[in-house]
Each structure stands twice: as C-alpha cells, then as structure tokens.
C-alpha cells in the first residue's frame, strides 16, 4: 500500500514537472517574437502529427511584427529612449487641435494604426504612431502585454509635452489600452482624454480566454503560463490588472468594445467602466469581435470618436 502511494506521488510530481516545462516554453514563445524570418506557426489542422506534438510542448512561433505600409501624409520618424529605444511616426496637422498618440495591440505594429490616424487627422489632430518594444522598428523581441510598455507610453507623452503640446490624447487597442491605463496609474501622466478599445481586465483572464477559444481547460495551465511569463519578463503577472488600474484614471475616457469579443469578456469591460473615476462613455459594437473597429464599424466609430473629442476639447 505504501509503495503504491509512493508511485502515485511520483507520477503526480512528474506530471507537475511536465506541465511546468510546457508552460515555460509557451510563456517564452508568447512574450518573445522570433527575430529571424521564420514563419508563424500554422493553424492546428494544417500541422503534421510531429508538428502538433512539437507545438504542444514548445509553443508557437511568432515572427517579430514588421511595418507593412507607411503614412500617405508627410511624417517624421523619431527614435525615443525609454526602457527600450522605440520608433514612432509623428504626423503634424496644419492647424492642430491637439495631438493623439496611438498604441497598437499584441502582435501588431504602428502601420496597423495608419487608418485610425487618418481619421484623427481629418478631425484636425496631429498624431504619433508608436512601435512598442519588440515590434516594428523598435528594439528587442520582447513583449510584456502592456506591463513594461507602460513606460513607453510615458516616454511618448513626455516627448509630445516637451515640444509644447498641451492637448494630448491617448488611443490604445487591447494591449495598447492596457499599457495606457498602467502608465496613468504608475507615472501619473495626465492626458486630456483617453480612447481605449477592448482592454482585458487582467492578465490571468486574457490567458484563460485563449484556452477557452481552443476549447481547452484553463486550470492549471493558464495560471502556470501567467506565472512563468511574469518570471521570465521580470514582473508578477497576476498583478497586471487593468481593471484595477482604472481606479486611478480621472481624465475623460471613451471605452469601446465588440459584443462578440472572445478574448475579452463583457464582465471585464463592465468592471473597467465601473472603476473609471472621471467622465466616461461606453460604446458597444454589434456583430464585432476582437478586431479593428474602424474597419467593421467605420461610420459609428468615427462618430463616437468625433463626439468624444468635441465634448472634452
């Protein structure tokens, strides 16, 4: 009886060790893009049996996001020193009402923000489009899903303030929204207003959502992924919670959400909205997931943005 219990304990320890090894590799791949030209891991149905096993144990390959297009307007390329050197495009409006700084989501880069920048330009605002660390032409291959990127938000805000701009607005999608919220909480920057699209409520919840999309159980792997992802990148992942950051945000805020978002739940959005301290608006787009709202809902999105900016100018 004693030997059976001992063998059972050994099996449990072995399984626990294997789960931690798998979580370690997945967390590293999730937070570190590959610098070379390796292709992104194919969808499961296109992988061979060996490929599926390899992906299961070692995680997916994510090539470093590269800028695929450039602004049609005249722009200046800036290199700003932050926790990493980051690249930005500064597009000046002829008669600016202010400046909107735009931050992209996970696995993206500043060229994905060009269409939204164009809309702000039409409304009379200068814009600055930002490559977070690890993306586009910014240094490194690391991403921390908005945690360390918060310092880069501050660096961009400080630069625009240093050239005499007083009407500074921040726009961020998903990870970009989380980074904005953390930056306001950590560094007490004071934008005139923020526009945040589909921010997740917590790092743990957004990892759980990824498992649910694959119809995989969240326990215990989601927790292990958050644990190792934080350890590898120098922070405690379970404390990366935009819903808590919202309690420190007093400037006007426009919160945008797609009702069919499978990456961020409505409860997370409601928690964030409740916790925002200043004047606030929530707009929910029908038949819309975790995607570019401007493409799916151009007229409504543009009207929401215009009305928000007019109200607080």
Image: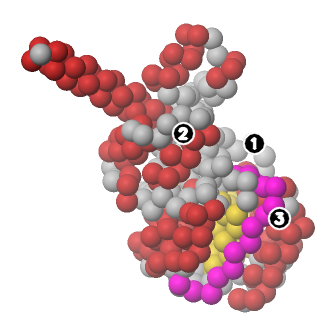
Per the rendering, the mark at residue 192 is none
Please give the residue where the numbered disc 2 appears in the rendered image: 211
- Separation of marks 2 and 3 at Cα, in angstroms: 35 Å
Label 1: few (<14), some or many (≥20) within 10 Å?
few
Please give the residue where the numbered disc 1 appears in the rendered image: 68
Magenta residue span: 277-292
Q: Earlier in the sequence, mark 1 or mark 3?
A: 1
Q: Earlier in the sequence, mark 2 or mark 3?
A: 3
Say whether residue 191 is left or right of residue 102.
left
Q: Nearer the viewer, residue 255 or 36?
A: 255
Main SS class of the magenta portion in the image: loop
Q: Earlier in the sequence, mark 1 or mark 2?
A: 1
User: What SS does tag 2 mark?
Assistant: helix
Res 85 seen here? no
Quadrant of the rendered image containing residue 136: top right
Q: Nearer the viewer, residue 65 or 266?
A: 266
């Amino acid at each position: 009886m004693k030997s059976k219990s001992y063998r059972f304990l050994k099996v449990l320890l072995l399984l626990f060790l294997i789960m931690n090894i798998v979580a370690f590799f997945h967390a590293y791949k999730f937070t570190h893009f590959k610098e070379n030209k390796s292709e992104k891991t194919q969808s499961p149905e296109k992988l061979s049996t060996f490929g599926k096993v390899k992906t299961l144990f070692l995680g997916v390959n994510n090539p470093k996001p590269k800028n695929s297009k450039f602004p049609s307007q005249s722009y200046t390329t800036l290199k700003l020193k932050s926790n990493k050197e980051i690249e930005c495009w500064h597009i000046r409006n002829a008669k600016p009402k202010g400046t909107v700084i735009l931050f992209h989501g996970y696995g993206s880069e500043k060229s994905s923000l060009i269409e939204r920048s164009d809309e702000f330009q039409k409304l009379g605002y200068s814009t600055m489009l930002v490559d977070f660390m690890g993306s586009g032409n910014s240094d490194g291959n690391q991403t921390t899903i908005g945690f360390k990127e918060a310092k880069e938000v501050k660096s961009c805000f400080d630069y625009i303030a240093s050239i005499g701009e007083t009407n500074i607005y921040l726009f961020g999608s998903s990870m970009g929204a989380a980074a904005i919220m953390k930056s306001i909480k950590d560094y007490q920057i004071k934008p005139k207003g923020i526009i945040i699209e589909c921010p997740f409520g917590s790092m743990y919840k957004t990892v759980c959502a990824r498992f649910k999309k694959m119809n995989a159980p969240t326990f215990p792997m989601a927790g292990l992924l958050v644990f190792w992802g934080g350890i590898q990148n120098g922070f405690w992942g379970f404390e990366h919670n935009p819903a808590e950051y919202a309690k420190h945000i007093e400037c006007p805020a426009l919160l945008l959400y797609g009702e069919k978002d499978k990456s961020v739940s409505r409860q997370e959005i409601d928690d964030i909205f409740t916790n925002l301290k200043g004047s606030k608006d929530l707009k929910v787009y029908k038949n819309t997931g975790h995607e570019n709202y401007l493409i799916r809902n151009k007229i409504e999105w543009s009207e929401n943005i215009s009305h928000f900016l007019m109200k607080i100018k």
